[in-house]
Amino acid sequence: MKLATLRTTGNRDGRLVVVSRDLLHCVLVSDIAATLQGALDNWDEIRPQLQSVYEKLNQNQIKDTMAFDASEACSPLPRAYQWADGSAYVNHVELVRKARGAEMPPSFWTDPLMYQGGSDDFLDPTSDILAVSESHGIDFESEVAVITKDVSMGSKKEVCSSAICLVMLVNDVSLRNLIPAELAKGFGFFHSKPSSSFSPVAVTVDELGEAWQDDK
């Protein structure tokens, strides 16, 4: 299943739509869930209803469809309760740290590296990255993101895996030249990590087929 959020005046959370597999058409599903966050809040109940719409849409059994235009889409979640970014490719982490003259602790090869980013206002997928000055070192990293339903503290890997609802791409934005001084203060990222943007469409894991293995 493929889902997207369209921009709408007066609603920061946009309008949820189901998108056809070929990405050509979409349909509003306000009668099921007005927003993606609304769908996630009751995912186990809402997903089968959205899946039914998706199947009918792909079979041309729905009349009130419209062309899907990615330029009219917000990030699937225009804002979120949580955005946690983890670095799983340690070689990349090592290179980034070397670029700013920081040694990589041996524990990084075994302990998860994660920070809590700002999630109050994600960029649209096609929006420009805004910054006060290019001298701040505007950069972004291409990453894979997952949206989960509720996950209890201390959950085992299998429980976390079953909590994955949707998969997206993300442009994780950084201001490289602000990072060293900010991290030196000991409080982590803030000014150096502005809003990121996500792919216009979020997909359920089954859409990825054999490309999705072992939760990656």
Image (cartoon, rainbow, N blue to C red):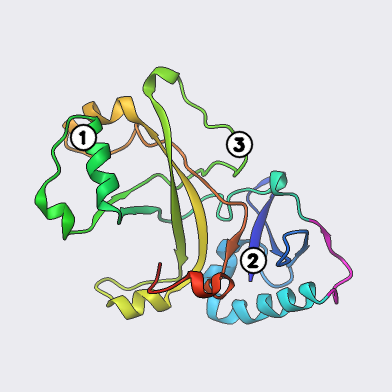
What residue is at 33 percent from the left and 80 percent from the top? 158
Circle 3: residue type: Ser
Label 2: how many residues lie within 10 Å, few (<14), some (14-19) or many (20+)?
Answer: many
Dividing the image into 4 quarters, which one contains the N terminus?
bottom right
What residue is at 65 percent from the left and 55 percent from the top? 5
For the residues marked 3 and 2, what is the alpha-carbon distance in whole angstroms?
A: 21 Å
Q: Nearer the viewer, residue 119 or 97?
A: 97
Q: Name the residue under label 1.
A: 98
For the residues marked 2 and 1, what is the alpha-carbon distance in whole angstroms?
A: 39 Å
What residue is at 45 percent from the left and 56 percent from the top? 144
For the residues marked 3 and 1, what is the alpha-carbon distance in whole angstroms?
A: 30 Å
Disc 2 or disc 1, which is closer to the eye?
1
Question: Position of 155 compared to 198: left or right?
Answer: left
Q: Name the residue under label 3.
A: 127
> Which portion, as a residue range, is magenta?
60-67
Q: Main secondary structure of the magenta part?
A: loop
Residue 41's spot in the image, x, y percent?
52, 70
Q: Residue furthest left?
A: 106
